[in-house]
Amino acid sequence: MSSMRNAVQRRNHKERAQPAHREKWGILEKHKDYSLRAKDYNEKKKRLKILREKAAERNPDEFSYGMLSSKTDKHGRKIQDRGNVSLSQDAVKLLKTQDAGYVRTVIQQTRRTRERMEQEYLLMNGGKVKVLGGEEESGRGNHVIFADNPEEQWSLGVVHSKGRTSSSGKDDMEQPVRDDLIKNDLESSEKVHLDPRQLMARKSQALHALKQERAARKLRKRGNETRQSKLNALKTREKELLATEQQLDHQRARMSGSIGGINKAGVKWKVRERKR
């Protein structure tokens, strides 16, 4: 009989959900949730009752010898030793020396990364370097290449305003010249009597080249901005690390007594030098 009773499908008894007008209160609380909440509330109420009784029965003249060694701060909170063992002066100086060594290692790594990014940035911007106390010098030579037609000029590189070509193609001042050349080529093709199909093909090629050039220019500009921001971040990090190194050296010098400073009482002091 039990097997037959289990074989029959029974009705699934579902729990009652929260009514629609009370959805802002969250899930509907069941009896088990109420039991946990009531148990927690009663425990807290008992604990508060015990504390009130202790406060009411407290003797203001009560004394214990532990009061002589205990301390409180200005807010009345008890200051208690956590059991931490204080390090010696030599151990602290050694730790600060290790910290300074780590900071110097990070400074060297940051400096090498910054120098490498500066070289990449200079190469991407045409190799121009600014000599201290002098004028800008270009890293590439003044080799001039002459072309017989505009197609050959395009294959060689960017067209300068003076008719010369450059193989680098990284100077932003030369980009409008290329756009003007594409537009002039498009206008000249319209003036020449060509087959309509050839004219449409030439126009589409010129417009496609113009779009590609503008997209490449935006991509180069975005890359230069990204490199510049990374370079500025590395410079800032290197500056902060140098300041940290100086602070650590200053702390170790104060601990060894080789320089003056201000003690905990706020009194300024300095090292007495030997008269010569």
Image (spheres, rainbow, N blue to C red):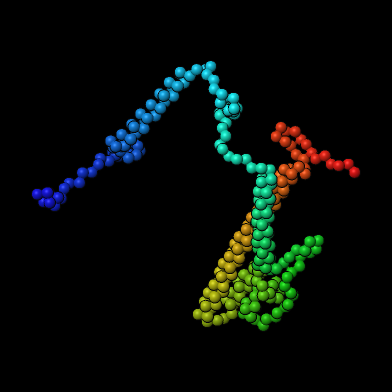
Residue 24, percent from left and from top: 35, 38
Is 21 left, or right, of 270 in this rendering? left
The image quadrant that residue 39 belongs to is top left
Q: Is residue 45 above or below residue 139?
A: above
User: Residue at the spot x=70%, y=79% of the render?
Assistant: 145
Residue visible at 58% across and 68% down in the picture: 216
Viewer-closest of 142 and 185: 142
Residue 162: x and y in percent read 72, 73
Q: Work out whether residue 233 or residue 171 is closer to the camera in this orientation and state it.
A: 233
Q: How many marks?
A: 0
The answer to whether residue 9 is seen in the rendering is yes
Is residue 21 among what the camera can see? no
Check the image and report above or below for 261 versus 47. below
Which residue is farthest right?
276
Q: Position of residue 168 (x, y in %)?
A: 66, 72
Q: Going by the picture, which residue comes out furthest to the front?
A: 65
Q: Quadrant of the C terminus?
A: top right
Which image quadrant for residue 171?
bottom right
Residue at coordinates 25% horizontally, 41% vertically from top-left? 15
Q: Which of these two is toward me, 201 or 269?
A: 269
Q: For residue 122, which quarter of the picture?
A: bottom right
Q: Position of residue 46 (x, y in %)?
A: 38, 26
**Which of 18/248 is in front?**
248
Seen at 23% across and 43% down, the residue is 14
**Residue 118 in the figure: left or right of residue 43:** right
